[in-house]
Image (tube, rainbow, N blue to C red):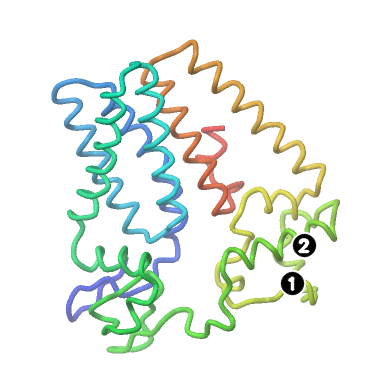
Amino acid sequence: LVTSSGNYALAAFQTGSLFLGSYLVFPVAVLFSFFLTARGYKKFLAFVGATLLTGCMLWTGSRGAWFSALAVFLAAAAIHGYWRKEWKVLFVNCASVVSIILIGFLVLPNPARNTVLSRIFIGLHDKANLLEVPTRSFIITGEHRVSLAYVDTNFDASRGQLWSEHAREGVYNPFGLGPSYGNVLREQATERFLETRAYMINGGAHNTWLQVLVSAGIGGLTLFVFAIAQAVKNLFVLLRSDRTVTALCVASGFMGTLVNATFLDSLELRWFWIVL
């Protein structure tokens, strides 16, 4: 996180923010699970920890990580409420989720809050001084000049575009292109695959399922889906037989990890395999 010397605003693009958000998913699951099950001062400490980590996750600007954290919160709140068999507990858990997200946002410094808001309201930066409303998409180009990292929307690509292009390449290459499929696609420069500026900057399919499909083919994706299905089956067995904080951590962390895998290439992330 780089701050400008003039007003200490968050003004530079943090290239590792997506992966940072991914790494924070499971720690958030652990702290929130402890908050739900602990008592006394331990419950308070877990609440503070979950709130601070949630604030950090918001600051990364990774909306995939935001959805993952929301999946963690909802899964843990629902499972804990089901264990307790009380609607009141479920309501309190959901209220706690809202409180953690809101407080986690409010405790951030103003530039960080602007980062979050600009990722929610995309057009916010169009009507403001970039130094006053910095976002994770801004880069410093000079001593007092800041510009957007993605200035030409004609060359920028949404996840939907990247997903459709990678799905198409998966169909045309049923046996996969190997783990370095990104280099192959760039070298081929096929008409099916638009070599967008966003892809050149970020790389990858931004989706683990498509990452497996393009790199390992239909057979690899089949084995991968089978492994995930087996993990889900084992998770349900665990939740029925073990109603402890450990089971709650694993269950909510697993749900958050799966959601995160939908928005990011996760095969290189250690957390993904540890949780799986």
Instruction: Give the amino acid type for the residue marked by disc 2 in the picture.
Output: Arg
Q: Quadrant of residue 263?
A: bottom right
Q: Are marks 2 and 1 in contact (CB under 8 Å)?
A: yes
Pick the quarter of the image with the C terminus: top right
Residue 121, position in %: x, y?
36, 69
In the picture provided, is 143 more to the left or to the right than 72?
Answer: left
Instruction: Give the amino acid type for the residue marked by disc 1 in the picture.
Output: Phe
Establish if 23 lies above or below 79. Answer: below
Residue 141, position in %: x, y?
38, 86
Q: Which residue matches tag 1? A: 193
Q: CA distance from mark 2 to mark 1?
A: 8 Å
Please name the residue shown 74% across and 60% down the image.
181
Establish if 148 lies above or below 48. Answer: below
Q: Nearer the viewer, mark 2 or mark 1?
A: 2
Q: Which residue matches tag 2? A: 168
Judge the density around disc 1: few (<14), some (14-19), many (≥20) Cα neighbours within 10 Å. some
Residue 21, position in %: x, y?
41, 52
Pick the quarter of the image with the N terminus: bottom left
Q: Quadrant of residue 118?
A: bottom left
Q: Identify the secondary structure beneath mark 2.
A: helix
Establish if 162 lies above or below 85. Answer: below
| Among the two numbered marks 2 and 1 on one chain, the one whose residue lies closer to the N terminus | 2
In the picture provided, is 92 more to the left or to the right than 153?
Answer: left
